[in-house]
Image (cartoon, rainbow, N blue to C red):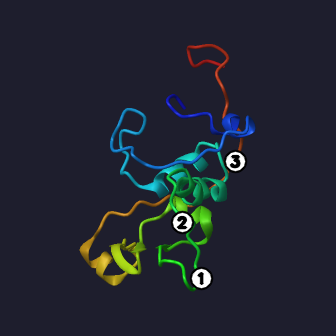
Amino acid sequence: VAGCAPVRLLRAAGVRVAAGSGALRDTVNPVGRGDPLEAAYLLASRGELGPAEAYDAVCARARAALGLPEVRVEAGFPAELLAVRGDGLAGVLSLAYSRVVVHDGRVVARTSAVREYCDSAAAVALDLPRQSRPPFQPPSQPPSRPADGDGQP
């Protein structure tokens, strides 16, 4: 993708790579939200890093690049925590909607998302539009292809 750093090549050359998200609707990411998890998602979805490496790039490696101390979940370390609802790291990166941020022992941000499925009685009563697919039916025979451009075989 144009404008993206060649992360795999840089790492192969021995460059320590960290990532962040200052992308607030800039030319490389015109819909950027300034969200480090979004940066990790983009690294993983573009094939530059796997989900665990992408998360590490915006977490531990980013802190190290900024000269910040390591964060550990142990007694005696400051409470720095990002709790995200998701099924595994790949799920967190792709759907990081609901989260709680703890900084210096205090909850400083909370984001929640609600997913509703339209099979409830209320949804049926409201006649909400549904996005659905008809059941898959395999074709009875392969479609014919025209031999020339006029639609004739």
- Residue 92's tag is 2
Q: Earlier in the sequence, mark 2 or mark 3?
A: 2
What residue is disc 1 on? 74
Q: Is residue 129 visible?
A: yes
Toward the bottom, the furthest residue is 75
Q: Marks 2 and 1: in contact by CB < 8 Å?
A: no
- Please tell me whether mark 3 sits on a helix, a strand or a loop: loop
Q: Is residue 134 visible?
A: no
In the displayed structure image, the side of residue 144 where residue 26 appears, left or right: left
Inter-mark Cα distance, 1 to 3? 62 Å
Work out which quarter of the rendered image holds the C terminus and state it.
Answer: top right
Name the one closer to the observer, 65 or 24.
65
Q: Marks 3 and 1: in contact by CB < 8 Å?
A: no
Q: Callout 1: 10 Å neighbours few (<14), some, many (20+)?
A: few
Inter-mark Cα distance, 2 to 3? 41 Å
In the image, what residue type sits under mark 3?
Answer: Ser
Quadrant housing residue 76: bottom right
Work out which quarter of the rendered image holds the N terminus and state it.
Answer: top right
- Residue 112's tag is none
Inter-mark Cα distance, 1 to 2? 23 Å
The label nearer to you, 1 versus 3, is 1
What residue is disc 3 on? 140
In the image, what residue type sits under mark 1?
Answer: Glu
Quadrant housing residue 150: top right
Q: Earlier in the sequence, mark 1 or mark 3?
A: 1
Name the one closer to the observer, 126 or 89.
89
In the image, what residue type sits under mark 2?
Answer: Val
Name the one closer to the observer, 29 or 148.
29
Picture layout, residue 102 above or below residue 47: below
In the displayed structure image, the side of residue 43 where residue 108 appears, left or right: left
The label nearer to you, 1 versus 2, is 1
